[in-house]
Image (cartoon, rainbow, N blue to C red):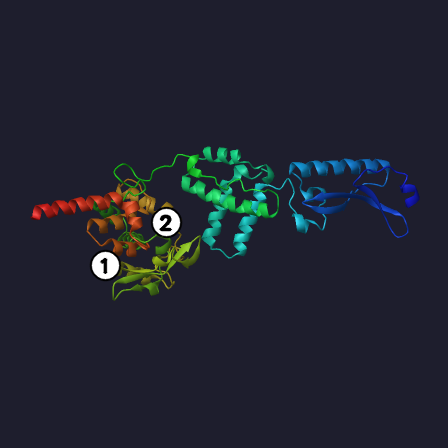
Amino acid sequence: MLLKKNAEKLKTVRGVSIRYDKHERATGIQLAFTYKNIQCREPAGYEITQAGLNAAANKLGTIKHEIAKGTFFYADFFPKSTKLKLFGGATKSITVKTYLDRYIDKAEERGLSISTIVGYKKDVKGLEPLWSIPVAELERITIVNFVENATVSSKTLGNRLSVLRSALNAAITDKVIRLNPLIGFKLKEHIKIAKKTDNRKKHKDVLPFTPNELTKIIKETEGTEKAIVTFWSETGVRPSEWIALKKEDVCLITLEVTIYDAVVHKVTKSTKTVAGQRTIPISQELADLLELEMNKHDEEYVFVNDQGKRWIAESFRKHRWSKIIKRAGVGYRYPYQLRHTFATKLISQGENFWKISKLMGHKSPQQLFEHYGNYIEAFEKQSKRQEVRSR
């Protein structure tokens, strides 16, 4: 053990000193520096020799240099320091992926819905090109390049950047970065926004079936398939809603079904919005089909598959719908177009827009104008022509 009288013969520089115990025995080398206006003293971690003191001096020089540059991370130099509670325990090498994973963990701790968590996880997966980048080195230009090379929709990109922006806020708390590189970032300035409608106000995602096509489709169904397709087209429900329909929500006397639930990622939850809980009238023909279905089994749900289990909408689309469409000789469209078919049919019949919105589970008619603008316009023109003719 090196005694104080011998240790004092070693050369030290300002900020590097030797610590002693009460018996005047040298116990270690200490560094002293100022960080964020706070006096800090930390063990250097070197042997008490002249070489150790020289190494400590070099380490102190590096610390002061990085503090001056604004690139100093306390945990990189002193991972076990009690001052990490004050300065943050993050290191310079901590990556974007680490903060994205933390964001998912926090979302689960907060008890967010399954569908929200799954959506976040998809967004995190979509940010994979940025995963390995140290957060401290993530620059705006990197994000711009990521956006400009993306092949997904602007909506998907916006969702991904929203998750990234929120995740990086934790890096500010950890003092890994001073500013979030996504603050003030405007997506529209870096991508070409795809128009959802053409010059005739026709929504590109809305391709409803004609009455003739719908007749052909239903003609090629029987049993459970017929009940599902008829129910879907006659009520305009979302796919997550028809698979969640329970027997207790069907009234064969008043000819009504009430939508309370939706199944999202195999979990039953309330409908997408409060407005989604609604009562929809049905025809006697559909009521008869539903009664047959409910009498086939003892399960609580109206529609069950061959294994006696509740349907998975994606499974129905892949294994049943595609075959039905092929047999009917109709151009393929996703079964979600049955919902659009329901809406456009009511519009063409001159139904009140607020009533249509209510039946669709929308808060207001605004979405009708966004999705079915050209159908509404065509109906209005037709109504005016008929009005002129009747004069």
Tell me what residue is drawn at x 37 percent, y 59 percent: 274
Q: Earlier in the sequence, mark 1 or mark 2?
A: 1
Residue at 59%, 40% (x, y): give it: 135
- Residue at the (89%, 48%) spot, across then down: 25
Is 155 located above or below residue 354 in the figure?
above
The three-letter code of the residue at mark 1 reads Ser
Q: Position of residue 83 (x, y in %)?
A: 70, 50
Element on which disc 2 rests: helix
Q: Is residue 101 left or right of residue 199?
A: right
Outermost residue on the left side: it is 391
Task: Give the vertical position of 42 relative to 247 (above or below).
Answer: above
Label 1 crowd (10 A; few <14 / some 14-19 / many >=20): few
Work out how far the residue at label 1 is from the one at label 2, CA to CA, in angstroms. 24 Å
Q: Residue furthest bottom?
A: 253
**Residue labelled with disc 2:** 316
Q: Nearer the viewer, residue 260 or 60?
A: 60
